[in-house]
Amino acid sequence: MKKVLLILFGFTISVVEAQAGSENVSYSTENIFMRANRPTTKEYVIDGSPYTTGDKFNKVIIKGFSKDVQDLRYNAYEDEMEFKKGEELFYANKADNVKIQFPELNKTYESLTYTYDGKTKSGYLVLLLDNPKFSLYKREKMELLKGEKSPNAYSKDANDYYAKEKDIYLISRDKKFSKFPKNTSEAAELFSIDKKELESFVKSNKINLNREPDMTKLVEFINK
């Protein structure tokens, strides 16, 4: 029987259900009740890795929750947080607005339901800048590409492989998401700021709108 495990995100953990002769176990943590689902097992070899945080499971900090939460890693192909129990992998449930901090990686993911490009999505975004006015996020994504067929019978076909998609940077205001502007004209319109003032800041600080540190610096300037 497939195991079902609940991720322990609470202050006081108590077993509320255990069936004799069964591997099903449920846990309750005050008002928090979270179920983890096992990821689909791939039966064929895939080259590369779907993890943007590395294959290692890392310690995490989740504000307001237990310090004993399982070590996690982010699967950017499945858009899931994974943890390990014994030799088996499980997914953690997505709960809106939960921030998962990876101290060793200096990285924070936020679980969000958001609308972007006309579609409503539910998943994890890297939180780069958190501010009541404008926040900056990054979407990481891995795609699975088909390996090339061998041109002859003397060599093997190449395996399918994971490849990193280009990161997408998003601006959030009042829970509305927009793609980070490509130029100062778009930025002035998006941030409702005088274009000349913005151009002066960009020029004097040598801001490159395609570089992540400069994106953060620009949004910090807008938020002042």
Image: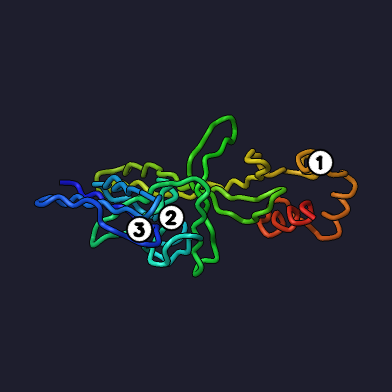
Picture layout, residue 181 above or below residue 131: above
Residue 137 x/y as whole percent: 61, 50
Mark 3 residue type: Leu
Could you say whether the residue bearing mark 3 is in a helix, strand or loop? loop
**Which residue occupies the foreground of this view, 16 or 66?**
16
Is 136 or 48 nearer to us in this picture? 136
Mark 2 Cα shell of 10 Å, populated few (<14), some (14-19), many (≥20): many
- Residue labelled with disc 1: 192
Give the quarter of the figure containing the C terminus: bottom right
Residue 62, x across and y down, in percent? 48, 60
* Residue 178 image offset from top left, x and y in percent: 66, 39
Q: In the rendering, which numbered label is found on residue 8?
A: 3
Of the two numbered discs 2 and 3 on the same chain, state the one appearing first in sequence: 3
Tell me, for residue 15, which label it has, or none.
none
The residue that label 2 is drawn on is 74
Q: Residue at x 28, y 50 (%)?
A: 45
Crowd rating for badge 1 (residues with CA inside 10 Å; few <14, some 14–19, many 20+): few
Give the foreground label among 2 and 1.
1
